[in-house]
Image: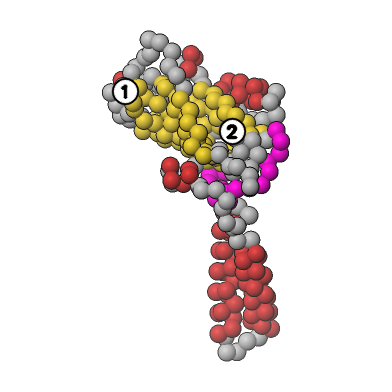
Amino acid sequence: MSEFVKTVLTLMLIGSVLIASIAWWNDRPNEVVWTARIGFSLLAAALFSVLIRRRRPQDRATDYLAVFGARYFNRDGFCFDIDASADDGVCYLVIAYQSQYSKRSEGRIAIRPTSGSWMSRPQFASICVDLAINPGEYGVLRLPVPVSKKLQGKTVSFEIGAAVCYPDGKGERLRFADGVLLRDNQEFGDTFTTEVIDAAAASRFALTSPVVIRVLLPAEVATEFNRDQTIERETAWTYVSE
């Protein structure tokens, strides 16, 4: 059960209890009041029973992304968050990711600044990262990017899209916190997402519409690179079945 559904059911439970309480406090009940007493009491009991039965199971893996940041995104079990940092005069987009499931997966993240930002030039139309992810894997990816002087030290809005597939099936669910769920939407309507969709279709990916995040870019970093930079990846944890 998603966190959104739980929230709705909890609000309905609170409302039912309040209405039932008011009805039971009426010392001169008529037919309508009696109907409210019984109906909302039964509804409250049913909602309480559903919430108790659907309590989130205990995680079998640490939610490392919750430690990385309070907010992260979730595309069908492929969870990630994006931030920026500086190291030795280079800006890095830092992508922390973690799978919710016990089988291997293939994830894809597409990133671009919104219109008018520093990477909206054709040669930087998009960043598309493919990841072969081990079961339940938690890891960090660091992508070196140049930053123009006028945007160093400023907050930039990025569009992000995500995709995932499970070649061997999902397996067991290891973590039950959902984060911010990304929904299916094939209608992107521009070259950024169209290119990603075309590439993803051949690999059985299901894509989401892009959402916008805001990232603070570091200052005093390179505005261009004179040589190829290396994408750094570190795997911090992988699930091993018992």
Q: Which mark is residue 133?
A: 2
The answer to if 75 sits in the magenta stretch is no
Residue 234 higher or lower than 170, as above or below: above
Residue 194 higher or lower than 69, as above or below: above
Evaluate whether residue 113 shows in this view: no
Evaluate whether residue 219 shows in this view: yes
Q: Which residue is mark 1?
A: 88
The type of residue carrying mark 1 is Asp
Q: Which mark is residue 199?
A: none
Q: Position of residue 55 (x, y in %)?
A: 60, 61
Q: Position of residue 210 (x, y in %)?
A: 55, 33
The type of residue carrying mark 2 is Ile
Provide the residue span drawn in magenta.
Answer: 167-185
**Farthest residue toward the left?**
220
The answer to if 169 sits in the magenta stretch is yes
Residue 20 higher or lower than 116, as above or below: below
Query: Which secondary structure dominates the residues rendered in magenta?
Result: loop
Where residue 54 sits, quadrant-wise, is bottom right
Q: SS class of the residue under badge 2?
A: strand
Residue 4 located left or right of residue 205: left
Residue 201 located left or right of residue 193: right
